[in-house]
Image (cartoon, grey):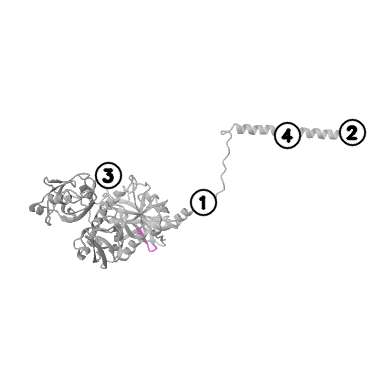
Amino acid sequence: MSFFDKLRRQKLLSFTVMLFTLSFGIVLGTLINSGVKAAKDNGQAPGATPLVIPSPVELSNTFSQIAKQVAPSVVNVSVTYKPQPVRARTRRQTSPDDGDQGDDNGMGDFFRFFGNPFGNGIPEMPNNRGGEALGSGVVVDGAGYILTNNHVVDKADKIKVKFPGDPEKYDAHVIGVDAPTDLAVIRVEGKHNLVPVKMGNSDAVQVGDWAMAIGSPFGFDTSVTAGIISAKGRVMDGDTRMQFQHFLQTDAAINPGNSGGPLLNMRGEVIGINTAIASRSGGYEGIGFALPINTAAGVYNDIIKTGKVTRGSIGISFSKSDDPRTTASLKLSGASEGVFVLTVAAGGPSEKAGIKQGDVIVSINGQTIHDGDQLIGIVTATPVGSSLDIGVLRDRKRENFKVVVGNLAQIFPEEFGGGRQEAPSQDEGTTISFGMTISPLTDSRRETLGIKEKGGVQVSEVEPGSFAQDVGLERGDLILEINRHAVNSAEDIKKIQATLKPGDPVMFRVLRHDPRRNEWTSILLPGTLPNQMH
């Protein structure tokens, strides 16, 4: 075979091998692709695309940083109580919805307003059977001083404090309490290297600001919740002591056991002490209340100095600025704003200075007084024994008095329990178009009731929905004056009514029996006549 024949034969062989290899590759690729497609089409989720987890990215960590920073300063407060003897209750203290809360210095009324604080878990306060209760507290001084709620430690036989990450419970004792603000200062023993929280300024808080709460709800230590400030200066009706509580409202979850723990801003500073909730169920419903730290700090400073809080008083009670009857009383005195004096404490600073029922306080030390909250702030912050120059309007004339501030606790000592008694039974009397029935009083009847003042007529009945009911008249009240005109009979009232027209202001001065003191107290009831009377 020639050289050229060999070369031609070798090229043919190479081409044949190449053609075979290419054909085999095509057939094999087709088979593999068909198999994969068949496997894909025959899967559990045809056409589905696998999920891809992204690389971890750090999100906002403000809340977690605050929690780590503040958590060591927030403690669990557990208290134990010895069983207490069960005492008879008055009608006011007992209702079908009341839990067995024991004697809690009036705070039961406070918490009934906010809803049952116990929920279905561990209680914050004791009952008559004794046992344990739980709350929270916050370390405010490295020397072991802790701020908490009075209702958490009130009447406790033993107080134990537990710190995060430390299984031991440390003994603590009460340094001082302040019932009007529901605050208490306790000191822990045997624990060292405490970390106090940073103080904020609650006056700087704005509605809509972020807020965090830390505490031990239902006994779960160091629970963190977040929300916003829903409102400021929230005032609750109820016990007169609550006039010193102007709460921060928040929707950060606060539950039984959170009481005494801190409410924080986004700098990790304490802006409030969690105190209560508004709840029908006893648990979180989006409305919690914290006492502003500016108020709490003032109370704390007084307690660590003297063991108690001393507040000034001028010995009066007054109507609220948002009470519709206040407008009528101010109109009678010719004032557009001010504080209308409802009662003057016997022997108190105002009585000694010459201030009377019906006066309108319009200034203190030259500063215009707009409402009762402003007056309270000035007077309670004034040292006992100091003098205040108080300007009043009386019968549309300006008068000034120098009043020496007294001790609030001595002028209005705390009273416990005792419900309002039924008004004395009355004979049938004369129906008056204010919507009430009145009866005259004989001298013997006055002596029996212990009424020393002469004149007046007694209210036998008050019609539901009437003007008399609207202004606050009650069965058993003794009406002495209407618009400063003496009242001694039904005819006197009718004569006064004849001079009035719809929209006119009307003010009753009455004596009302106070069963707690077993005495008759003079009060003022202002109102405005409606368009129609009955």
Q: Secondary structure at mark 2?
A: helix
- Cα distance in 3D space between marks 3 and 1: 47 Å
Point out the tag, 2 or 1, that comes first from the N-terminus: 2
Q: Which residue is mark 4?
A: 25
Q: Is residue 384 above or below residue 286?
A: below
Are circles 3 and 2 on residues that touch, CB within 8 Å? no
Q: Which residue is mark 1?
A: 59
Q: Which residue is mark 2?
A: 5
**Amino acid found under the numbered disc labelled 2:** Asp
Q: Which residue is mark 3?
A: 97
- Cα distance in 3D space between marks 2 and 1: 78 Å
Q: Secondary structure at mark 1?
A: loop
- Cα distance in 3D space between marks 3 and 4: 87 Å
Q: Is residue 343 visible?
A: yes
Percent across and percent down for residue 276 are: 34, 51
Q: Magenta residues, as a range? A: 141-147
**Residue extending furthest right?**
2
**Residue extending furthest bottom?**
386
**Front residue of this view, candidates 307 and 470:** 470
**Amino acid found under the numbered disc labelled 3:** Asp
- Cα distance in 3D space between marks 1 and 4: 51 Å
**Amino acid found under the numbered disc labelled 1:** Leu
Point out the tag, 3 or 2, that comes first from the N-terminus: 2
Q: Quadrant of residue 70?
A: bottom left
Percent across and percent down for residue 297 are: 35, 61
Label 1 vs label 4, nearer the camera: 1
